[in-house]
Amino acid sequence: MAAMGTGTAGVLTSVTGLSARGTARERAAALESRFGDPADPDNPLGHEAFLRADARAELPAEGERLLERFGLNAEFVPRSLGGRLDSIEGLVQALRPVFRRDASLGIGYGVSSFMAAVNAWFAGTQEQRRFTADLLLGGGRMTVAYQEIAHGNDFVRNEFHARRGGSGFLLDGDKHVINNVERAEALMLYARTDKAKGSRSHSVLLVDKELAPAGHTVYLPRRITNGCRGLQFGGVQYAGLPVPASAVVGGVGQGVELSLRSFKVTRSALPSMVLALVDTCLRTAVGFAGRQSRDTGTGMDTRSSRSVLAAAFADILLCDSLALAATRSASLLPRQSSGVYAAAVKYLLPKILTETVYDLSIILGSALYDKDGPYGIFQKHVRDLPVITLGHAGTAACQATIIPQMPLLARAAWFQGAPAPGELFEADGRLPPLNLEQLRPHAGHDPVAASLVAAVEDDPERGDDGEDVIHRLAQGFLAELRSLRDLCLELRTTDPAWLAGPETSALADRYVHVLAAASVVGVWRQERRVRPGGFLADPAWAVTALSRTAGRLGGLPGLTELPEPPAHFEDLMVSEVLSRFGEPRSYDLYNSPLSG
């Protein structure tokens, strides 16, 4: 395989010592500072500039130049290969400053490359890993080609095929809606290598476009979407393109297994980055409500607006708690954690965050339709959210990962397994080196759910009403988990129809909400241990998040009525929202300083 790019020298030497050697939090802060004040209309990296690029259906050129100077691609390459990837949580932290501004830039410049490269990190040969690392560290791009329009997420039915020919394979067929398909220097292609049905019918191939002979490739017209208009979605058509046998990643017939392993990382990472869009939406709504209060005496001063802002803040923290547990489990519990967590993040975050931005849009009223000015970024993020939260794994695909594992987890994990260590729920806590080779799509363990069991059984003296409400809600979610266990054990798993039934889909939905609630309890308990007196150690946010989750489930077993949160909790939530708006700091668990 030919060496590509300029190696690490061309890009990484331009990165400051802080971003090259510092922690993910420090690198994120450095990148945030370089973006500058997003509200400054004269900032070439501000909201106005991104809105103009979006209107032209282009990626912001100045944004791409910034990320190239920063060496963002190094975040996608393991440290052992010269990059800065040492945890999935750290990767998410480093990308949130980008997604806070523009999802098209975050995906178009970087995340598409990561989604392709992770296949090489999981199963590539030494040569394939070195090629991938050198390409990215040299500023190059990769992309991943899974879908075919006719089959969507049903990869096993894909018809694009790689047939034996010469000393390698000949590629034939079409791939559609692939980001950066023309701009990328290399592709990870999912192709049929066996006509027989079954899980061994497909393989993943690393295609070096520099080695591709002319006359075999046609690029299909670009497709411009309503959201993320800057993304370069297109297609490719191959007619007998020869690739060497060394292009196969992980072995012939291992495509399904490799895709499931890679999804364990990508399904948790991308939605966790997307959380930053809703951070900006909340910030925009707070700015609008504050202006309305000054101009008309309405807005922030109305109880309804304050309730929406407090609820949106709680939703962000709830989603980030689940995302935190999923991303940190890849480092802390690689053998115990399950692909269920990543699928849960990919399933639940889009549902809740879409609901959150809808509620926030009510505060903006007609300003929701502004395409420029101080509120234009809100409508852009609203358009972008559905595009980036679907990707290659929609709701049904995530449920297809979760449902088959639930009976096993019900029998052997939820009430028998060991709980996760507290560090799983500690944002920015220390982590051991990431070892992707240890990750498996199915583990048979559920330390997050087991942590909920342990939290309820560990019943220390509760000091105030808020702690008592958390305990009662945790008991309710534990009762929900018991109910799920009983229902899962009754499933007729010998009948294939059980996998696709509406009843099992409903069970999966309830289970994912329980995981989110368990993560909230875990974060709150860990914060009380390591940072007592801080906002996240206060019961207000946890009670609000748990109450909203219980409401989405329509109540909890054993609780005829949900416990009423103390009246002052909403005021505490709004006070924190306003404090983080004024300083400014992010609305996620990291409470990071922002430019502006």
Image (cartoon, rainbow, N blue to C red):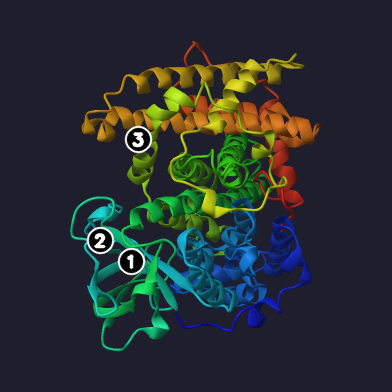
Q: Does residue 394 lie above or below 348 as drawn?
A: below
Q: How many marks?
A: 3
- Badge 1 marks a residue whose secondary structure is strand
Residue identifier under label 3: 404
Residue identifier under label 2: 149
- Badge 2 marks a residue whose secondary structure is loop
Residue 370: percent from the left, percent from the top? 50, 59
Residue 438: percent from the left, percent from the top? 53, 49
Q: Nearer the viewer, residue 304 or 78?
A: 78
**Of label 2 and label 3, which has the lower sequence position?**
2
Residue identifier under label 1: 177
* Residue 258 seen anywhere in this rendered image of the structure: yes
Question: Left or right: where does residue 193 sit relative to residue 11?
Answer: left
Amino acid type assigned to the residue bearing label 2 in the image: Ile
Amino acid type assigned to the residue bearing label 1 in the image: Val
Residue 229: percent from the left, percent from the top? 42, 67
Q: Residue at x 58, y 66 (%)?
A: 77
Q: CA distance from mark 2 to mark 1?
A: 8 Å
Q: Residue at x 72, y 39 (%)?
A: 576
CB of mark 2 within 8 Å of CB of mark 1?
A: yes
Label 3 CA crowd tier, 10 Å (few <14, some 14–19, many 20+): some
Which of discs 2 and 3 lies nearer the camera? The answer is: 3
Looking at the rendered image, the quarter that the N terminus falls into is bottom left
**Of label 2 and label 1, which has the lower sequence position?**
2
Question: Left or right: where does residue 100 sit relative to residue 258?
Answer: right
Image quarter of residue 521: top right
- Badge 3 marks a residue whose secondary structure is helix
